[in-house]
Image (cartoon, rainbow, N blue to C red):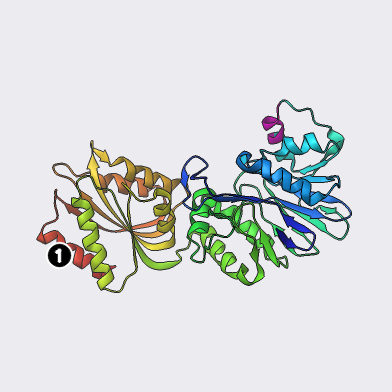
Amino acid sequence: MEVIKNIINIGQDDPKQTLFEGQYKIEHGIRYNSYLILDDKTCLVDTIDREVSKQWFEDLQKALDGRNLDYLVISHLEPDHAYSIPMILKAYKDVKIVITMAGFKMLQNFLNDYTFNNDNITFAKEGDVLSLGEHNLKFIMAPFIHWPEVMMEYEMTSKTLFSADAFGRFGTYDYNDDNLDESRRYYIGIVGKYGSFVKNLLTKAGNLEINRIAPLHGNVIEKDSLGKYLDAYSKWASYQSEDNDVTIVVSSVYGNTLDASKFLENELIKAGKKVNLFYLNHDDFHQAIAYSFKSQNLVLFSITYNNDIFPVMKSYIDGLKERNFQNKNVYLIENGSWGPLANKLEKEMFSEMKDIKILKELRIMSRMNQKNKEELISLAKEI
């Protein structure tokens, strides 16, 4: 697949993959990208995951058409991008590896049975340029997006930014992500903790003329779509809400707490609010987290369970904390048949997060009654 003349995407789709990093459900599969630059010198930017490495290697050899591979640029050592490095080292004995110093330390750990020829290792630093002929790669350090060794490459002639895991998304190459759901879920889940580092990257990117972004997952983002993605990343990295919608997250055992959450949802919709409701017992856990970042207003309906928060709700709040959740309005509704504790315990968890405003706490005892309905109607108006 040609990105632009003499830059080929030899990446592969894995539509059958259903779980990413052992935890993220991926309904639409995943794309692993790998880029080959054909010039006076040939250069491969990153390899690929084991599940699709056979076809990828065949496509690489076909694209090279008998030429040698001169350079292998390693942007990121996570195995879904670095697994196939040994295939390259075996097939192209004289290939020169370009990598960060931190990356090389990791590479030796992953390939601890391989003896490297240090004469064939080049340690890239901020601003270094690798000339391939017409094409020139300028290296941009991008630590903690989302591992510490990460770098990106700016191809100065075509004005293409090879962005490693940044600007990636779940889904195969042709998956339509116009609403950014899979880009957001990918970012919040994997990169969300590192907002300050992403802001540093965006500052660097702001000094570049970029025609396209070529990430390691998802599709290549062309110039006419760049503004949408850069704006989204700016909001995500700054922990800003994307809208004034309401996200309701609920855990329930016998349905009474779920009924109450749906009652509030209906009242909010009648009042003209857009609502995203996630029933944690069944809905995607990480999508609930992503939408909690997206919306300004978060409402939790939770039950007390064994004198604690119901496990899936507790894990969800831990997931928010892990990703630096902040700058939100939060409303807590608890349900407990004899000793409700959920609100108290959730408040303690949210107290460890930045700029969280707990604006209302309500209580249901076993099952919503008329008084509870009136309280929820009033809460809908308040929100």
Q: Position of residue 112 (x, y in %)?
A: 70, 27
Residue 81, quarter of the rendered image: top right
**Quadrant including the N terminus:** bottom right
Q: Is residue 229 left or right of residue 266?
A: right
Residue 199 image offset from top left, x and y in percent: 60, 58
Q: Which residues are magenta?
A: 106-112
Q: Quadrant of the C terminus?
A: bottom left
Please identify the dominant SS of the magenta region: helix
Q: 19 or 334: which is nearer to us?
A: 19
Q: Position of residue 301 (x, y in %)?
A: 26, 53
Give the residue drawn at x 39%, y 60%. Answer: 328
Q: Nearer the viewer, residue 352 or 33?
A: 33
Residue type at mark 1 is Glu
Residue 220 in the image: x percent, y percent?
64, 61
Would you place residue 89 above or below residue 124 in this image? above
Q: Is residue 125 visible?
A: no
Q: Measured along the vertical axis of the image, is residue 134 above or below residue 99?
A: below
Q: Secondary structure at mark 1?
A: helix
**Residue found 59% across the figure and 65% down from its top:** 230
- The answer to which of 326 and 53 lies nearer the viewer is 53
Mark 1 lies on residue: 374
